[in-house]
Image (tube, rainbow, N blue to C red):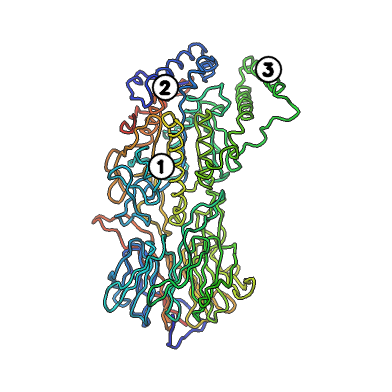
Amino acid sequence: MARSSPSADGLRQGCPVNEHTLHRRLFLEGCLAGGAASMLSWSGLFGQSAHAEVAKKTEKRCILLWLCGAPSQFETWDPKPESIYGGPFGSIPTKLPGVHFSGLMPKCATIADKFSIVRSMKTKPGEHFQGIELLNRGAEARPPFIRPTLGSVLGQQLGHVDNPVPNFVLLDPAPHGNEFRAFKDGNWAGWLGAEYAPVRSGGEFKIPNVDRLAEISAADHHDREALRRFLTKKYENDQKSAAAASQNAVFSRVDGLMSCAPLFDLERLPEADRLRYGPGTFGQHTLMARNLVENGAPFVMVANGMTWDCHVMQHEIYQMLVPELDNVIYQLLTDLETRGLLDSTLVVMMGEFGRTPWLNASRGRDHYPNAWSLALAGCGIRPGVVVGKTDDDGAKVVDRQVDEKNLFATIFSALGIDPYAEYLLPGLPTFHRVEGHAEPIHEVLL
Amino acid sequence: MPSETAVEAKPQAVKLEPGKTINLPSAVLGLAVASDGKLLYAACLDRFVYQVDVESKQSKPLFQHRNYASGVKLLANGTQLVSAGYDGALQWFDLAAGKVIRQVDAHRFWSWKLAVSPDQKLVASVTGQYLAGSIDYVPADSPEPTVKVFDALTGEVRHAWTLRPPVLSVAFSPDSQHVAAGNLLGEVGVWNLGTGEQVAAWKTEVFTSWGYIKSHHYVGGIYGMAFSANGEELLLAGMGDMKDPMAGNGAQTWQRFAWREQPARKVDQIHAGEHGNGLMETLTVHPSGEMFVMAGRLAQGNWNAALFQAGDGKLIHSIDNKQRNIEAVFSADGRQLFLAGAVGQRGRDKEGQCPDFGRIQVMTVAS
């Protein structure tokens, strides 16, 4: 689907070099072996069992803690306690000398050497929908072409078809959510196709109606699915039917879900784990994300509605939200490290922009894309780095300004994916994973 | 506030007439009014407690907290102040000596609201952090008492009770025999200050929202409360249910309960057609006892401060003073109403200054 650019070899990559080499080589072999049709997916590559085994051992994953609504940088990663705009939560020292976090993040302060902070994001959209679009797709909209979201791209690049776990899982308890709902109702996978859209779960913590009927044996079920797949694939090929292709993708996904439904059942996880992640939905979903990536899901996005959009009662809500986030990040990163997964799992923690330094009349903070923060950890990320700086009030970026393109180049680079690969889209204009050859944020890359 | 001054009020014909507006550097979270109405004391978001001269509109900082100053009241016949802050501390300030004479670390978290008993013998402060306690974000139990009563003379703790956090409002009964407090979930407790026993507890659903649109957690609560003049009823203020807890657009709401009845009985609530939308943060009974004011922020509608008859609850008069009203205080003679709060904070100007955004508006209670 995407062609590596000549310059990709010159990129610094975060994970062990052999893994990247292997991935790229496998990709090319898969493309060549599978012919033009299979270039549209990984099936031509991972359908070969020997390659699949190797890939499993080297697989990379990504968890996006999607802080939708846009969290305040002042109450998280870039506190300004001495400013008149600083807010009531103060700051605390961290394990990194001279680096302070919000006073609401004492747990993260103790593991500040395990992740990196970017304090100098500056983006354009000041409204949610456009911001959500931008930070999920990595580039400004160019209608009518729909760029795939980060989850779809990573699901395609890191996933494989012999894995019953969905390649892109969205965990989100809130069915509504204003602009986020509008985004959720849209086209996640864009030109990659429906098979790279997310499987959505949340709230109930179990995917309903995917249990195999008791009267159908596993063997029967397998035989029926094989017959269905054969017939529909034949129809798809004979008729060159996109509809049949989509239907096949959906059936494959449902079939996969039937086998991996237990991964969505938190009651199967140790109670001690559930307690550690805290009682709220966000913590429980993050635990589920850990469980999913541990069991092969390449990309899991954990959202919690648009809870960070506190135009009113910001102090009243942040007193709860940020401590929950603090604990969730602490538990997740600690867990991943303990389980030996942190080096292969990229964790991205961000919203669609930041919040204003100044408080509105309702003592809330409004939208602010001019200077905001995010955090990165794990695969390919150099831990304990703070990139960029804002002024004393947090109103302007004064050092190392970066944007969504730099971020996406960083994410792809950290995962060993060519950021500048060109999409092969017959009949469409030329698109790249990251447009404009934007540089990654080198300081945070290993 | 006790007063021996003759009180003039004719509720049927009363109006609030805007007077001067006093600017302060930072949002005013708490306000005290000297008995003659000429000096004000403002607890502000910039951590300072200011003295404000109403005539000249000049203010000067008296002392400060380590975090937002959230409340200030007069004590000892107007010779002392007691203040509270988001640092969890109470401070006693001697106005003649010009210095803090006592500090008590009252809470581990913020003091949300401060009250002084009418006989000026007791000080109450309420606290509590909202931390997730369940899958649907019911607040977790507090690790410390959330309602504390202190001796006004010594600062010693006289009572400590726990109502589910965060506890946002507190009020003493007119006879100084009881204290009431209300929280995020609309739970109310009333305690006997003589025995220390809780004598009433109930929950009213109307002031609290659980996020439906954007987020799944609780928001709102009972932000203001006051006993009726005869002490038999308790008035509560806040806003009604919102689907989107971020919107701040619940109905402007008060409710009145006969708290001595078991269970407490709702006597009245804001009448249909008499409210807009927005958080009501303060409710104060006029010294005459014949009316009360509720004020806060306007989201939709046409008023953010309104007078209501104490007896039948009817709206008497309303205004929109274009600010967020956080505390409303009548002068002792009832002729003036001081509405303290803020407008929106702004970025620095060309000179690098942050424009004043604290506001105190002086209203005449006119017949």
The three-letter code of the residue at mark 3 reads Leu
Q: Residue furthest left?
A: B351
Q: Residues within 10 Å of mark 3 (few under 14, many from 20)?
A: few
Residue at (50, 41) in percent of width and height: A303
Mark sitting earlier along the chain (2/3) = 3
Q: Residues within 10 Å of mark 2 (few under 14, many from 20)?
A: some
Residue B215 in picture, x, y percent from top left: 53, 49
* Chain ID, mark 2: A
Left or right: where does residue B273 sit relative to residue A375? right
Compared to residue B137, the image places residue A147 above or below, namely above
* Chain ID, mark 1: A
Residue at (56, 57) in percent of width and height: B209
| Foreground: disc 2 or disc 3 | 3
Q: Which mark is residue B280?
A: none
The three-letter code of the residue at mark 2 reads Glu
Q: CA separation, marks 2 and 3?
A: 34 Å
* Residue for badge 3: A231
Residue at (43, 32) in percent of width and height: A342
* Residue for badge 1: A125
The three-letter code of the residue at mark 1 reads Pro
Q: Residue furthest right?
A: A215
* Chain ID, mark 3: A
